[in-house]
Image (cartoon, rainbow, N blue to C red):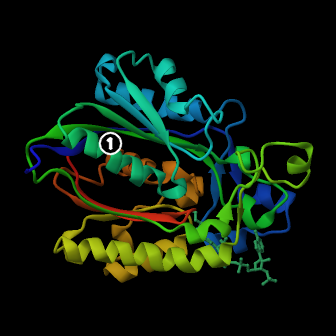
Amino acid sequence: MSIKYNAMITGVGMYVPDKIMDNAYFEKIVDTSDEWIVSRTGIKERRLLENGATSDLAYKAAEDLFKNHNINRDEIDVIIVATVTPDMLFPPTACIVQVKLGCKNAWGFDLSAACSGFLFALQTGASLVESGAYKKVLVIGADKMSSITDYTDRNNCILFGDAGSAVLLEPTEDKSMGIQDSILRIDGSGKDAIYMLGGGSLNPPTHETVDKKMHYIYQNGKAVFKVAVKGMADVSYEIMEKNNLKSEDIAYLVPHQANLRIIDATAERMGLSKDKVMINIDKYGNTTAATIPSCLTEYYRDGKIKKGDKLVLAAFGAGYTWGSTYLVWSL
Ligand code: UT7
């Protein structure tokens, strides 16, 4: 049976808190330097949400989208929130966002896939739209990474920031528009390289789990770096081959923003010059599920992408989770 609809992005929005943590701030709290951070990661600043939770980041990003695209919130069918920092283990953050937004006709859920969360949520939302069952699906990536970051651990604390960003998916019968293809993967053998051990059913919170700092993100950066470089570059190249895309066909690579060196390696494998790569890691660091949609929002608002542009989105994260999506910009 051929699918009648494609899912296309018809709105974008984002929110970052005002409070900036620059590299000079980290020079004061851990043994690091601006030079080390910039040369190893590409990060200059990140944002900190001092009061509030992930649902606030998600809610404000969605409000920004509604305002800029004149969306009637009663028409939202589904809200998917990709996050690894839910407000609580339950209820789902999507429910908290739904009531804040007043989307009274929506259902929804959270999706946990770490730094690949937005790509996985985008594909999930696209499938709901392509089925013909739903017409307006809000896909949000939001993470308050500061809530799980150990600010005494120089290996990790310099990497992460807080942000939320959202896209709206709607159906189109024009098959040349919107999401064209996705290659998504998981490999649980990566579970020992990047994780948060405490707080779940394996290690429910106790004084001991807190004393052992088990409620913070841990990663073996070097190990993750190696597989991330290969994983993100391979899957991005694979989606190009599968869709007969040459580097000159692609307007932008939209990579997860974990490390500029991982992004550069992916672009190189795809044969793309630096001006064809969306970057905002310098301003926000790694905001986990919010990196890709916030790049889309900023580049769209700066007039750098236009309708018909071919984009390749790519991510790699904890799990391991990774993947790549090819879409034709429709705004
Ligand atoms: O988004 C989810 C997926 N995560 C990723 O994709 C992250 C992947 N990993 C990375 O991006 C990089 O591995 C890091 C940025 C985390 C680290 O960069 P690296 O070039 O792999 O550094 P390293 O871990 O090999 O550490 C090199 C040195 C070490 O010192 P020695 O052992 O050589 O004396 C570290 O202790 O740098 C030291 N170091 C630091 N020095 C100054 C580690 N963190 C810092 C720091 N400032 N903040």
Under circle 1, the secondary element is helix
Q: Percent from the top left, x then y, of residue 66?
A: 36, 26
* Depicted 127 relative to depicted 89: above or below: below
Q: Percent from the top left, x then y, of residue 55?
A: 57, 31
Q: Quadrant of the C terminus?
A: top left
At x 56%, y 35%, the residue is 57
Classify residue 118 as left or right of residue 285. Answer: left
Judge whether residue 39 can be spotted in this image: no
Which residue is label 1 attached to?
125
Classify residue 105 as left or right of residue 249. Answer: right
Quick one: 103 or 190, which is closer to the camera? Answer: 190
Classify residue 157 as left or right of residue 62. Answer: right
At x 49%, y 53%, the residue is 291
The image quadrant of residue 319 is: bottom right
Quick one: 324 or 131, which is closer to the camera? Answer: 131
* Depicted 331 relative to depicted 212: above or below: above
Q: What's the residue type where badge 1 is placed?
A: Gly
Classify residue 120 as left or right of residue 52. Answer: left
Q: Percent from the top left, x then y, of residue 284?
A: 58, 53
What count of labels does the image hold?
1
At x 36%, y 73%, the residue is 235
Judge whether residue 186 can be spotted in this image: yes
Q: Percent from the top left, x then y, of residue 5?
A: 13, 43
Q: Residues within 10 Å of mark 1 (few under 14, many from 20)?
A: many
The image quadrant of residue 184 is: bottom left
Splitting the image into four quadrants, where does ligand 1 fall?
A: bottom right
